[in-house]
Amino acid sequence: MTRNTADTERTDSRPSRSDDAARASSARTEAAARAERLAEENARLRTEYARAMRGTYRRTARWLAVVGAVAVLGGGLFHHGRSVLFALGATGLFGAILTYYLTPGRFVAATVGDCVSAAAAANAQALVDDLALEDDRRYLPGTDPSSVRLFVPQRADSDPPADATGPLVTRPGERGLVLEPTGGRLLAAFERTLDGPLPTDPTAAATRLADGLVEQFELATEADPAVDPDDGRATVAVRSAAFGDVDRFDHPVASFLAAGFADALDRPVELEVESGEDRPEWLITCRWEPA
């Protein structure tokens, strides 16, 4: 009788399945509520960040307007240097108008671009691995910057495809994968800001591309090119690159440089990426057949 009573007490002290289900349901509800609060907080922070950036642009616009107005007023009061003051005032007022009305309305965090870029690179790399292709990355020139293509050969001695429409090339001697590089459209947008096409001189082209990488797209804080035209090689040391590790498949930073050299030199370019001794630095090497 004593043993049965003890067994009953032990059984009664165990949590019932209904209690476990209730606790699990409560935990799920709490987790969902926490996720909702985090989503709301993230949305609030993005809104605040965008508002702060718009405020910064508009304060800049107001100060430009003040400088322009003062310069115009000075031009009306002082005869000497009137033309210079009027020109300065017009520049300030025009810059204020542009800054105020062209203020970006949406700001995307670098982490968002990093997530998208990482997913695209992982998918492409998985496709390359599944097709048992080489590690070579060859950027093929086209008729314009947007038609540059990335060719991943099946064999190291494969020739560049005569028809790079892709994505799968099955002709003997040319088998591989042909893709639109991430740097192709960046390159097309960059060349539209230039007063002409990229220079055909490798050193001049490297300087332009490095400036575009840092100054226009802000994909890196520093980009220092070292070019050896006789050897057909250019190495660009990049620091603090956006969108994660540059040795990912067709990373935008490396892709922009390789596509740029392919377009400027009008010849295939092989890409190699390795990390430098200083961890924030990446060494991006582009090779081509010298003229």
Image: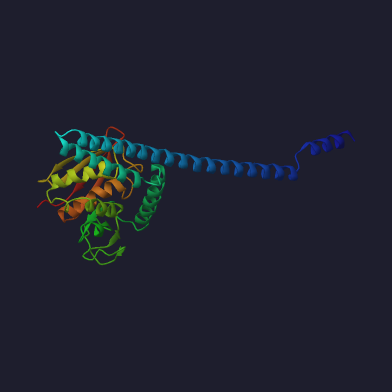
- The one of 38 and 55 positioned closer to us in this rendering: 55
Residue at 30% over, 42% down = 96
Q: Left or right: where does residue 3 sit relative to residue 290?
A: right
Q: Left or right: where does residue 143 sit relative to residue 25?
A: left
Work out whether residue 69 can be spotted. yes
In this picture the colour scheme is rainbow
Figure quadrant of residue 128? bottom left
Residue at 84% over, 38% down = 8
Image location of residue 7, percent across then percent down: 82, 37
The mark total stands at: 0
- The one of 177 and 87 positioned closer to us in this rendering: 87
Image location of residue 164, percent across then percent down: 25, 63
Residue at 27% over, 49% down = 255
Image location of residue 90, percent across then percent down: 23, 42
Image location of residue 192, percent across then percent down: 23, 53
Q: Quadrant of the N terminus?
A: top right
Work out whether residue 136 can be spotted. no
- The one of 158 and 57 positioned closer to us in this rendering: 57
